[in-house]
Amino acid sequence: MSPLKLRHIFIFLVIALLLGAWAGRIQLSEFAITSSMQAYGLKNITTEINRFGLSQSHISRFEFSLETDTGNFQLEAYDLKMNYDLDQLAQGRMENLAINKLVLHQVNSGESSKKTQVIDEALEPLKIIAALRHALREYIIFNTFSVEHMMLEGEPFGIMQGKAFYLKGTNDAGNTYAEFTLLEHAASGQDNNSRQLVINKLTEDSLLAELRHAALKEPVAAGLELNIRDTVIDGSYHVDALPLKSWLQPFTNIDDIDQTSKVHGTFSSSFESDSVIVSTITAISAKLAFREYGATHAAVKFKLEHLASNPFRQIKILHGSHVKADSLEYERFSLKNTRINMVGELSTSADTWQYKGGINTEQLAPGYKLQTLELKDITAQISANSENLHVDGNFSTANPPGKFTFALAHDFVKARGRFSINPLKPLDLNAENSRLSLLLTPWTYPFDMLAGRVELTTSAAWSQNRDFRLTSRVKLDDAGGNFRELVFSGLSFDHAFEILPDIHSVETSNIKLEQLDSGVTARNISTGLTLETASTGFLPQLLIQNLHGEIFDGAFSGDDFVFDLNRSKNSFKIIATNIDLAQIVETQQLEDIVVTGRIDGSLPVEINEQGISIQHGAFINAVRAGTIRYNPAAGSDQLKQNPLTGIALDALKDFHYSHLSADVNFTPEGMLTINLQLKGTSPELDTRRPVHLNINTEQNLLSLLKSLRYAEGVSESIDQKVRRQYKKNQKQEPGR
């Protein structure tokens, strides 16, 4: 319904009343009203007049219906009182309108094509501003007006339908003040008129409005300031979640929004021509929380360009549009110090839509729980429509330096998609001041890598009828680092495994390790590794196969075994062959003893919650015999006071053993106990007499290994040792 049509309806209504008064017959007045209003397309007109005069009229009932482009409109008004004078009527105005009850009905129309055409024509930019100003002049024709009980009925009114309002207002010198008050029936039986829409100022050029809840300490739930000029519409707004949630309670539930959330911003639309509108919208919030989502110090700016004839069917997001926040959060995930710039174009039609655009940011810090990943130079191209979504982009890691590409695709119709991250350039741990632990802050793991290259690949797939699947691949090339106090170098590893729905290897991979230093050095270690889904527990079990390595100029190997990460206890056996006793004794840093010979043995290892333990490990000499020469520099005279001890010391001065065996035990506290049995001869006693010796020793192995690690230099850190060892290997193999 146009403003002009509404204005004329009221004017002809009063004129008809005056004609009836002059004629002296109410029936004639009612006929005149019906005829006048039918001329403007109104139907189903009902008028019941109680009284009328030259300055005042009273209508007990007034109804009409109107077919509009958007549907069928019906008005019912009861107990209307109008005050006026002839001079005001001549100017198209009246003194007062008071309505006891007003009901508005609206039913949607199915004529969408006609409706669309009318909307498109009405939304030409300069016509918008002209229509707004015209409406303000033509609708407000009363100096004062009130509606005691106003109701809105029909689906087009949305959440407002079925609610009752009280309306009052004044119009003075072109400025309109109005209050819409929600009529609420309280438990006491009294109306609690606390919820209001207050229009503080309404002119041809401006609007100032607030949502107020008088029962609250901070009553203003939302505010709007609008300015209208010849070619520009602009203004500002603010929203406070706490009073807004209370204000909207009779209409809708917004408990998902945190009550501490507050938002304010600005908007503007510039009609620079009849064909193009440029709009800017901003929103700022110190704290914003919605369900599991949250933001602190967030700001949004959209700069839009759209066609005036079709403003909602083709929208360009221009340079300068961005989203930024100190923190964006979802459950345990977060983005820190975020600024995402965007450009794009959105096109819509009656049954479909399409978007193409791009985003970029100089830095991004995604986090999970308390850990943060520093990324930089992120760019992405987005293509989407009502059926599909495609995203392609790339990013870099700050330290250690690396480059990656990522891709996302989702089919909205079939509800399936995929996601992948692939290395364009591996993480370079050989760069200056680079290490794996700098990738995440804080680094909470007991290992680190300071040399080599790391490639990380991740892919995911999902569908409506299939579980979400997440797969990753880790490739290490000539890596060096440490696991707690263990220093390693020359680690090569290429392993693909599925993480979700359960953790297991895609295929068996081989691990190669050139050197492992715990104070004692092991070399050329290799093994096969397979992750398998455990029968109980979320964590996988590790299948270790073909474990081999070199130590003390001999070799060690392990039986194939399963290490279940869900179990509190796991056991396996290490087999040692051809171990050089001279090198073992050398690690003891003893100057008084020289040993020759080689031994074989087995060590049953158990790993439990307390640590590592060995029970009844056994060693025995290999086929070849050996010698022991022990000449203590000090304290030997005192030892010889015991006759048995003196004989043993004499025998060990030059002992030629044919048999050597040892029973070995190790506790999680680090205590190593060895029961040594020797059989042989000693020229110091008698080469023809056999000598049998049983020797028991006890030593804290962890303390020994610690002392050995510091033997090369107390001041040397693990980092220095790793890098020194890596450089040493590089010199030995210049072709690598």
Image (cartoon, rainbow, N blue to C red):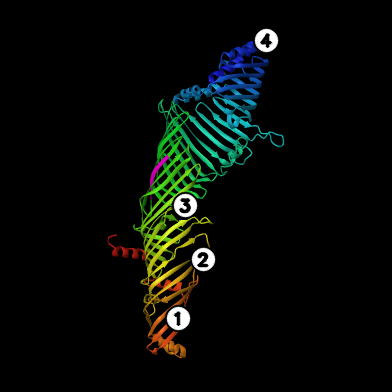
Residue 677, numbered circle: 1
Percent across and percent down for residue 591 are 37, 80
Residue 25, numbered circle: 4
Q: Is residue 393 magenta?
A: yes
The mark closer to the camera, 1 or 2, is 1
Q: Which residue is mark 3?
A: 499
Residue at the spot 37% in from the left edge and 68% down from the top edge? 550
The mark closer to the camera, 1 or 3, is 1
Q: Secondary structure at mark 2?
A: loop
Nearer to us in this view, 436 or 237: 436
State if disc 3 and disc 2 touch (CB < 8 Å): no
Query: Mark 1: few, some, or many residues within 10 Å (few <14, many ≥20)?
Result: some
Q: Secondary structure at mark 1?
A: strand
Which of the two labelled residues, at mark 3 and mark 4, occupies the earlier sequence position?
A: 4
Task: Measure how far apart labels 2 and 4 are at the Cα level.
Answer: 107 Å
Q: Amino acid at mark 3?
A: Ile
Percent across and percent down for residue 448 are 41, 60
In the image, is 96 to the left or to the right of 583?
A: right
Task: Measure how far apart labels 3 and 4 are at the Cα level.
Answer: 89 Å
Task: Measure how far apart labels 4 and 1 are at the Cα level.
Answer: 137 Å
Which of the two labelled residues, at mark 1 and mark 2, occupies the earlier sequence position?
A: 2
The mark closer to the camera, 4 or 1, is 1
Which of the two labelled residues, at mark 2 and mark 4, occupies the earlier sequence position?
A: 4
In the image, is 472 to the left or to the right of 48?
A: left
Percent across and percent down for residue 336 are 46, 49
Percent across and percent down for residue 75 are 61, 22
Range shown magenta:
390-396
- Residue most extreme to the left: 735
Q: Which residue is mark 2?
A: 608
